[in-house]
Image (spheres, rainbow, N blue to C red):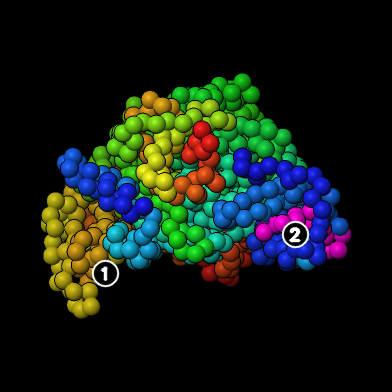
Amino acid sequence: MSQRLSVFAVGLALTATMASAQQLSILLPERTRLLQDQRIDLVVEVRDAASAAGLRVTANGADITSRFQGPVASDLDCNGTQDAVYRANLTSFQDPGPVRIIATLGNGRAIKDLTVQRFGVPAKRKNVILFIGDAMGTAYRDAARIVSRSTETVPNVPGFREGYFDNLLEMDKMPVSGMAMTYAWDRVVPDSANTASTWSSGNKIMYNAMGVFPDGTDCAWRAAGRNSATLATMLDNPRIETLWEYMRRKYNYRVGIVSTADVTDATPAGEVSHTAHRETRAAITLQYLEHPLLNNQPAYDVILGGGMEQFEANKRSDSRDLIGEFRSKGYAYVTTASELRQVNASGGKLLGLFRRGTDAVLNSSGIRATPDGNMDVAYDKLQLTRPGSEPVADFNGFNDQPFLDLMTQKAIEALAGPNGDQPFMLMVEGASIDKQSHPNHAAGTIWDTIEFDKAIGVGRAWARARTNADTLLLVSADHDQSMHIIGVTETPDTDLFDRGSSLTLNTNSPVGQQSTKIFKDSNSNVRASYSYSNSGGDPNTSGREGPPAMTYGDIPETAGFPDYLDENKDGYPENRQVGTKGMRRLSVGFRTGNHTGSSVPVTAEGPGALLFTGWYDQGDIMLKMAASLGGDTKDLDTTLNRIVTNPDYPKTIGK
Amino acid sequence: MRLAGVLLLVMAALGGTTPPKLLTFTLGEKPAQIVSRFGAMPNVVRGREYTILQFHDAGSEKQHDCDGGFEWEVYLNGSGAIQSITWNPTKPVSVSDLFPDRQYISSPTTPKTGAFVRHLSKETLVFATANSDDQKSIQQATLMRSVVADRLLPWVTNKGR
């Protein structure tokens, strides 16, 4: 388990008559759900183990004790008691249906129930492209639609008239919708790590963790900080295989990730990483290269995004040159949009790292380089003028970064191969929808959602061009954030937002008199109303919390729709006034600078898409993807086609 | 333990400098006192036999996703006694601010890994992992009961030297 462990002395006799009841724990969540042969580390912890020998474990009555190794001494809970651990690493179950695991030792006993879902791939294999807009709740989709599709997509047609869009977003046009609940294993408001692992593994994961369940040595890194000294206790947790790993191991699927974040950030890492904390970046990157569940072979065929520093010898605590090592394994390596356009990686392996963190150095914790080398956002790559409340871009010399649509196109080409016949799974992340929403940068987050939608368009076009409808396309978010579209449309700049001043607002009891900062976003037709902090400060003294947005001031609300202009027809409105166009704007407000616990939308297209209707748990997404990949979805797909094509059924305008 | 904290404050006052906030804790505080010191209600993480009180989420103030980026993490054992306080400063802190003697101990097993260590009393110590002994700044430091450090990180406490 950790460096503090040593194997118990052989010959510890079972002295049940002397021992009190052993405290046994099987480290699986309640209601664990697995596919046939999906692997987990089955771990049994024994607390106060004066005698830890003699463990017996059964699965549906069959003795599986021989799979376990141990006992290994440990100080579980960091309380100085004598404890022990048994492990059966990478265990799986072959028969579909319920499985009851019973562990006994002395007079101690533990029981866990899990469920195994049938799985087998058809002769004609299918693909999955999962698009994740990080934090892309409903308001983010709505805002991107209003900004980008209220422009003239047809000459002299405003795009948004009488309450209808003439041309909806790509993700809007997908025929099936559902909603996913995003709760973490241990809290209502999740982060990007546990959510990614949930849709990847089918099970709830604890906050900040990826592909592992909690264990009794988590106390060590909780108490002594997350650093190189406690790294072993962050990497020893019971692992669960993800669908990405599963399809690669069992069916030789090609897999890839595309992200505008550091590629070791939680969403791109969540498909294959196993760690109790997402900050263990050096270890995560190493898992990409030498994956412990894939015979120490690379986890991904395609990696595109930021985070160059995580791969560089002088930024890593192990001094390994991972870029060089990937290249030696046959990966084409690119660092700019120009190189990406030119590279021919069809059917091959591709590593593209387009950004290094500004002043990136190895963090003194020894487990990561810092700061994150996230790629720059669409708004800046387009060289649009940032609103006054948002920072001016600093590309740190990385002036030729690709957009997400190009990255997606190249990733699909690489994974599917020249004939398009190599089965694959790809995750594409619009990362800075979230990263720009944390500091409440409205323009940054909305234009990144537009960029993300264009990547979805690439995936849809590729899938629809195929002779067989063999590619499931999914669009969802890991979690929501707090942006909302608020009722201050068409408000003159002079009425809004001067970043340099603080305005005292009088509001009704019990809120009382508040002081809060409001921002003026010149040269912008989209802006935050004002920023709420969730710092926990006392609103009566810190001035960091304000009243609800709708109680603010006497802003005149007017009727009408935004009239953004897309002069160069690149699909990205320029966000400025030109003549009489671009005068009316969208205003959004942020209640916090952090995630929310709201459910997130899912849209689906392709084989098995109909499975994604309804309101369900985020972990169901993995099981539904598996059902699409492995099951016969013909009846579902025929039904959906009838719904979509039957002229007697209503059709959404703009779809 | 409390005396050590008071002494640090007095020494700092005499020297005209303000000690890092981490060193003003004694680990003898009650949870309610900790909450009072930070002036905010914490985010609480509960484990099987521990509780973490987290203060000052930096998430909303950074431009990237930094979930869980709390500046302060207070670790309580199952009895509610504070065992350690970890400080994740928002900006790097000079090593000499916390470790004027720059006592550095290398990890016996992991290359490029070590820790600056300072024994504040018989009962408490502060340590910060580092990648080399000539490192100028640190980005994390932990104040911990020595008895806990002896169990968790014996090479850091250099017990038995």
Q: Where on the picture, by quarter, is residue A272?
A: top right
The residue pinned by badge 2 equals A117
Chain of the residue that carries numbered disc 2 in the rendered image: A
Foreground of the two, A421 or B153: B153
- Mark 2 crowd level (few <14, some 14–19, many ≥20, 10 Å Cα): some
Q: Amino acid at mark 1?
A: Pro
Picture layout, residue A263 above or below residue A589: above
Locate residue B20, reporting x and y percent: 28, 45
Which residue shows up at 65% across the image and 36% down it? Answer: A291
Locate residue A35, reporting x and y percent: 73, 55
Picture layout, residue A385 above or below residue A356: below
From where the camera sits, is residue A93 visible?
no
From where the camera sits, is residue A651 visible?
yes
| Dot label at residue A548 | 1
Q: Is residue A83 left or right of residue A521?
A: right
Q: Which region of the structure is painted magenta?
A: A47-62
Which residue shows up at 65% across the image and 49% down it? Answer: A74
Locate residue A490, reporting x and y percent: 21, 61
In terms of sequence position, does the residue under pointer 1 or pointer 2 come before the other? 2
- Give the residue furthest to the right: A62
Q: Main secondary structure of the magenta part?
A: loop
Q: Is residue A341 left or right of residue A53?
A: left
> In the structure shown, which secondary structural element does the residue marked by tag 1 occupy?
loop
Residue A49 magenta-highlighted? yes
Which residue shows up at 82% across the image and 47% down it? Answer: A11
> In the structure shown, which secondary structural element does the residue marked by tag 2 occupy?
strand
Locate residue A516, reporting x and y percent: 19, 61
Residue A435 magenta-highlighted? no
* Mark 1 to mark 2 CA distance (whole Å): 46 Å
Chain of the residue that carries numbered disc 1 in the rendered image: A
